[in-house]
Image (cartoon, rainbow, N blue to C red):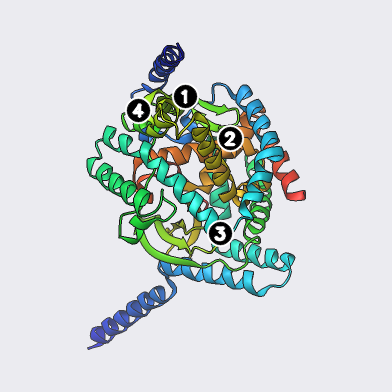
Amino acid sequence: MKSKKFLSLLVLIIVNILNINYSYSIQPDVFIQSTVNRTSEALKNKSTKEQKIEELKVIASETVDIRGIGLYALGSYKKDITKDQKQKYHLLFEQYFLKSFASRLAEYSNPKIEVKSKKKLNKNYTMVESVLIATEKRPEIKIDWRVYTKDPNNLMIRDLIIEGLSLARTQKEEFSSIIESNNGDINFLFKNLKEFSNK
Amino acid sequence: MNKILITALISFMLALNVSAGTDGESNLSKKPEDVKDCFESFNRATFSLNQGLDKVIFKPIAKGYRKLPSPIRAGTSNVLVNFSTLITVPNNILQGEFKTAGVNTGRFAINTTLGILGIFNVAKKMGFSEYEKEDYGQTLGAWGVGEGCYLVLPVLGPSTVRDTTGSFVNILGGDPWYNASTHGNNEYLTKSDYIATKVLSGIDFRAKNLDSFSNLEKNSMDFYAAVRSLYLQDRQKKIANSKTITNTQDDSDWEEIETK
């Protein structure tokens, strides 16, 4: 009798744990649609460009894996740098990324993005397909989002692929070009990142 | 004489290209960063020249063009796309895409007649599938010829040895519009008509990308490298002829990214 009670209690606890996990996890397509809606609201409601930029930075910090993108953009150089350099890089990259991301988006007034479908690539990544609805000035644009799903309770965006062109890959090749044209010295990349953020 | 020179140049470029492309790796599995920038100093100088020309000539013209009423721009763009079908169809055939070649021929016939030279995209309204441009560079890529080195051409912009070779095919008889206007022996068309359509295509393209180009330039630390990456990614996507994004993205580099 006692063991039956204990078993029921155990089942109840397990069900509750599963339920809690379920209630906190969100599907990648829903995550992207809600992020897009949030961004759209920020662009629509904030009056000044500076206010828009600040709000966009907050959204990016919460939904984009800036650290992960930074490591990807460093390519093979990430294996050669010291712990101190890595720390410095993460700090500089975050400042650079937020500035670049926010100023790119702040140009738009009210972009309408519709999530169409999703495709699970593996346990770590899902690609969410969406379209930026056409306006009189520009045609419809396909935007795909690489979502990092390793922790289902904390989904993060790792890449944006616009009409088949990956922004993270472009960033990686840009960084690699800067380092290579300065004899492989990563400090030149740091200098460039700093200059960009301060401009 | 000109033809002999061009043929010799193509053979030379292809010979160079074959040795650059045969490294035992499938062409589509390559990443843009694997394409060598053998002439980087020359390319960067040409890129700067092109940026100067763009600032003084092309950008102001494109801005002016964008002020034209939207129906005029749309009609012009439609006519230019319609002309491009003349190059797309032979390339569909060369790539073994016979059904697509048939669809594109039908599209061209309908838009040229009912759509008045292509001003109106009647075929689209009739339910024809979305049009995808093809060129001889893409066909060479589909046949397995490697990109060769990256090139920046004066005025024309980013290219590769393979894509430049492909462009030469147009003036060696591969472009029916070039043949009709230049060697057509008729009183209605001249070489300047061909040049006019090419210039207009360039202006139309620049006008459509005014905002995205200036946004990219403003947010790039090495604009040359960013444009090179985007051009090579775009060509790889077009050669893959895949509408599924997951088929054109390389995942291997992402797998090792662990931040925790």
Label 1: chain letter: B
Residue B70's disc is: 3
- Depth check: give the residue in front, A198 or A129: A129
Quadrant occupied by the N terminus of chain B: top left
User: Can you tell which quarter of the image residue B220 is in?
Assistant: top right
**Residue at 72% in and 72% down:** A47
Depth check, mark 1 against mark 2: the one in front is 1
**Residue at 51% in and 43% down:** A169
Q: Earlier in the sequence, mark 1 or mark 4?
A: 4
Residue B25's disc is: 4
Whole-angstrom CA distance, mark 1 to mark 3, is 37 Å
Residue B18 vertical position relative to residue A106 in the rendered view, above or below? above
Which residue occupies the extreme front position in the image? B187
Whole-angstrom CA distance, mark 1 to mark 4, is 18 Å
Do callouts 1 and 2 point to residues on the same chain? no
Whole-angstrom CA distance, mark 2 to mark 3, is 41 Å
Q: Where does residue B48 sit, x and y in percent of width and height?
A: 68, 31
Do callouts 4 and 3 point to residues on the same chain? yes
Label 2: chain letter: A
**Residue at 38% in and 19% down:** B18
Whole-angstrom CA distance, mark 4 to mark 3, is 46 Å
Residue bearing mark 1: B161
- Depth check: give the residue in front, B101 or A161: B101
Label 3: chain letter: B
Q: Secondary structure at mark 1?
A: helix
